[in-house]
Amino acid sequence: MCGLYGSVSQSDRQIESGVSSLGHRGPDDSGDESIRDRDRFIRLGHTRLSILDLSERGHQPMRTSDDAHHIVYNGEIYNFGRLAGSMGFGESLRSGTDTEVLLRLFSQMGPSCIPLLEGDFAFACFAQTEGKLYLVRDRLGVKPLYYALHDGDLYFGSELKVFPELGFEISENTDDLRSYFVFKYFPEDSTPYAGIRRLPPGSYLEYDLSSGSVSMHTYWRPDHSAIRVASYDDAVAGLRAHLRDAVEDRLIADVPIGTFLSGGLDSSAIAYFLRERGDVEHHCARKSQTDLKREGTSSDGYFAERLSQDWGLRTHFYDIGFDQTDERLIAESVYYGDDLIADGSQIPSYLITKNAASVSKVLLSGMGADELFLGYGGHLLTLLSRYMDRLPASVRKLLTARLATLQPGKGRAKGYKRFLVKLGRYETYGNSKYGLYSIVGDYERSRSVVNGGNNPLQYITPYFENADDPFEALTQFEIKNFLVKNLNYLDRMCMANGVEGRVPFMDHRLVEFALSLPVEYKLSSFGNSKRILKDAMKGLLPDYILNRRKAGFGMPLRSVFSDRQKLDDLLQIDYFGGMPHFNTDNIIALADEHIAGVNDNSSILYSLVSYRIWRQRWIETH
């Protein structure tokens, strides 16, 4: 895991300062170089977090012996040893790094080698003979890569904060501001900055130095496979084997390995395959009983501690909650988060990696399982909505009207009411309601804080307008949006503390296998979510893990914002009053609603707090 940056421009620029802005991504080494070719200046820079071959032989930028190809690379290619053997590189390799194998592959095969790579990667490779620079990103978007084009010049980097140092003038993307507050992140390839885009997962960009032209190519799509598993039992056995192999592949490292352990199904499944390895450390965030009561959710810490005792795991626990949440901590997560993601899970991820870094330089995460195996509340709502569609219109109308009046911030069963209220509120949105089920927070209230801008539904409707199967459409929508966001914040919070995050469920072979399975294998007609994953781990995980209630991994924001003084201190409502984009009356109403318990507006309020801190740090100082 490293940081990379660079540019192709018509004028010479010094970019050594790029090392400072990405230094947290690569505290072990750094390097940059400039090349002049075809009247253009190519700059390549790198900061290194040493995971494989810790010697100086892994230094980047790395070049072939004939200087024809240059590369800066971030990630891990787990089959690099097999690729080196099959290509006959053998003893000619100068290092034990996957970087060198990738460079040799690309020099011989060009972009046709990309589908051979198994792993998580983002890299820039300059092919001098061809006069082309390639930007490449892995299939699921585990590793980040951004780019911008301006007046024929190309800029790129692992994080947005490097772009001003590359000479790109940043400005706020106000067109998608309303979408940010709805999704709590910028969807698709949009970013907080005008003109800077994410390179889409599963794609590569080709820049031709001779013409200055740019072309985009897709080499992988998360489509359903045409191959179907013969039986449910075969699928259960296949999933167990795929997950075991994916975990095993991700143990390749010359540094200590650990896991994010929540006591939930996904992280516990990973821990199972590592339970006999005494050198693996596990790390868990836990909430106080007061926060759990206010949240209306269950305790990850309790289940992780019980599992650790039963298996003899070496587990470290870190407290998160009301007492730990302040302006300084949020500002740190926003700074390192970089891409303006208002997800309360960033903070516990940041705190875990900050404490874990001294003993674990690689952490395995269970992220991605919910998207693949229909484990979110939005999936259950889609199932319930399909059942409701079978009711007589008059009955359905009465039921949705009743559900729309639920007050999810009051009384018992808050966790359930937060989801059920969506069945009532989104009934009038046609098939787009399935996408709205999956967003965090209330759609109308979220969009009400901003005046004007693009319609957020433009990022939802195309997935569902012609969809015969709402679950297939929802999976595609989440993989290309919500999952990318989650992988984004995992990368940032790990790299903030010099830790590499790895995600076994994002092994592309496992993903393709999961996408080939019918819905009923994942979500039963009775609402049993992640059915096949539970059955794959049956007999391997304790029943108290398999049957526990799901609890989201995140800060207890509902609890934090239930305190008026803390909310006022963090929100700073006067800040929004001077900007024409914001409706301060609606913001005040949302805060009052949350304090009164009429609605759970914690995610909206957190997105406002995050936006204020981000804008003060990046827009007002540039």
Image (tube, helix red, strand yellow):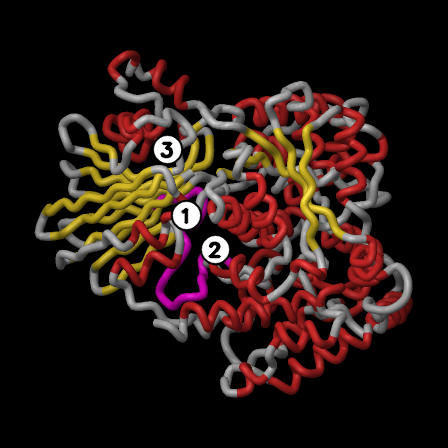
Q: Position of residue 9 (x, y in %)?
A: 18, 56
Tell me the CA gap for discs 2 and 1: 9 Å
Provide the secondary structure element on which disc 3 rests.
helix
Image quarter of the C terminus: bottom left
Q: Is residue 481 above or below residue 91?
A: below
**Which residue is found at the position 74% from the left and 38% from the top?**
263
Residue for badge 1: 24
3 or 1: tag closer to the N-terminus: 1
| Marks 2/3: CA–CA distance | 29 Å
User: Mark 3, residues whose alpha carbon is within 10 Å: few (<14), some, or many (≥20)?
Assistant: many
Type of the residue with mark 3: Ile
**Mark 2 / mark 3, whichever is N-terminal:** 3
Residue type beneath disc 2:
Tyr
- Mark seen at residue 114: 3
From the viewer's perspective, is the residue at label 2 or at label 3 nearer?
2
- Of all residues shown, which one is farthest toward the left? 39
Q: Which residues are magenta?
A: 187-204
Contact? badges 2 and 1 (CB < 8 Å)? yes
**In the structure shown, which secondary structural element does the residue marked by tag 2 occupy?**
helix
Circle 2 is placed at which residue position? 336
Main SS, magenta region, reads loop
